[in-house]
Image (spheres, coloured by chain):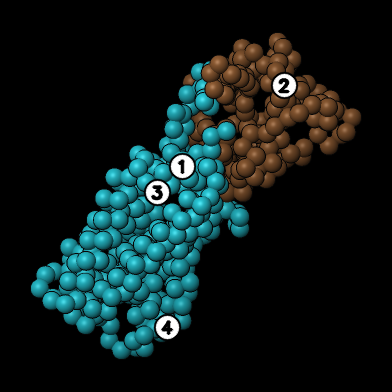
Amino acid sequence: MKEELFVSGRNLPNIDPQLHVWHWPIPVYLFLGGLSAGILFFAALYVIKNKGKDLPDSYKKALFVPPVALVLGLIALLFDLTHLFYSWRLFTTIRLESPMSWGAWTLLTITPLAFLWAASNIKLLFPQWDWKYDWIKAIFKFWNENLKYIVWLVILLSVILGIYTGILLSAFNARPLWNTSILGPLFLSSALSGGAAVLIFFSNNEEEKKIFVKLSMLLIVIEGFLFTHMFMGFLASNQVQLEAAEMFLGGDYTIHFWIFDVIVGLIIPLVLELIWLRKQNFSLKIVALLLLFGGIMMRFTMVHAGQAARYLY
Amino acid sequence: MVIDTLKCVGCSDCVVACQTENNVPIGYCRDWVVEAVNGTYPQLELEIRTERCNHCENSPCVRCCPTGASHIVEGGVVLVTHDECIGCGACIESCPYDARYQHPEGYVDKCTFCLHRVKDGLLPACVSVCPTRCMYFGDLEDPNSEVSKLLKKRDYKTLAPEAGTNPHIFYLI
């Protein structure tokens, strides 16, 4: 037997008996950040591919999601900071070793870009819209003229943001479930999958839907591949990572993971998309919502289960 | 710091001394006592040890802190600057020893090796009150210090060495 007990009455709030310092705002923030990254990535790709031609409605509508999602995500994040009034300290230093510092600076850059891009779109959706002030018109004139360059910056930032949401967790070697570099690409592919889901949701063009359905299917397969690799890595690793994998293979989080993340979030959308590609006789909106549901559930499972995994010394 | 697990009786005096010295809020603690039972009945082995922040050389908490609030000062002590801490909890998540906690005022708090006392030439509160004198505090870089001599003479272990943190608390076994 191996049993370790605190005999001095240690019962730290949110730490004992099981770590739970990060509550629901963190998975929500990781999901909304990833979703924004996915949408901005595809929107930027649209601009690059279309080369000045007219852009579809899905692009124009979807671009209103990132500013809202980023702001809600940031509010969720601030909600979880216990020393909130010192949060400006994030921006008095750049710490290359800290993924959270990377994330803070990326968000500081990408959020205004998302707002400007969405605002520049108002005129595309509502042609009679008038900005009234010349200086605002000048900003958007500059924006539209340089969009073809800005989108490259957006692609770079959105990839960093998407990867950051996973790397944030994998940087903690104290939590064996998170301590795998697979989380970076896994969260990025889930972020892109969320972006594709939003574009599918807003799309009213069959050809465009087909492209995004195929992309979304590819991303689901990549996610499945990355999950498999994650488990292969854990099962071939040390005791603490074996125990981390066990949480999903018969342990406390088995039902959450397999039912909500894998079956509802990945397999059912994949099957529905396959059926839709053959006979387009149902609305894809349900598929998009299932993908988004799967994305948020995956983050909840990973954040909660990760905190339950620990070193037993 | 060197802790002799063969001398520790688990009286928790160190815990109370720390709480008093550092004004630790009620319900919280910077150090604690663990009783570990190993083996198969009837060959059981009991180890009692007092634990706290390991002031790791390769500190994951310092590495992941987004503001630099968690930092290492001269002598290898890991400290948290309260008014630089945003309370994000990244350091708590990154610590394999669960040695940090969120202070009711919001910032993250933990053992400081009583640096304020050490600077005055005193021992950390926990070391100074230990009735069995199972704790030793000193400079590991000085080969003539008591801690260095003990580590040369006795067998020792660190906690979760597989976490790769190079802890600065050594348990004599």
Give the quadrant of the N terminus of chain B: top right
Q: Are marks 4 and 3 in contact (CB under 8 Å)?
A: no
Element carrying mark 1: helix
In this figure, which residue is indicated by the disc labeled 1?
A: A243
Q: Which of A53 and A141 is in front in this view?
A: A53
Element carrying mark 4: helix
Query: Local crowd at mark 1 within 10 Å, few (<14), some, or many (≥20)?
Result: many
Q: Which color was chain B given?
A: brown
A274 left or right, relative to B143: left
Q: Is residue A42 above or below residue A194?
A: below
Element carrying mark 3: helix
In this figure, which residue is indicated by the disc labeled 4?
A: A148
Give the quadrant of the C terminus of chain B: top right
Q: Distance between the residues labelled 2 and 1?
A: 31 Å
Element carrying mark 2: strand
In this figure, which residue is indicated by the disc labeled 2?
A: B4
Q: Which color was chain A given?
A: cyan
Q: Residue A302 carries which label?
A: 3
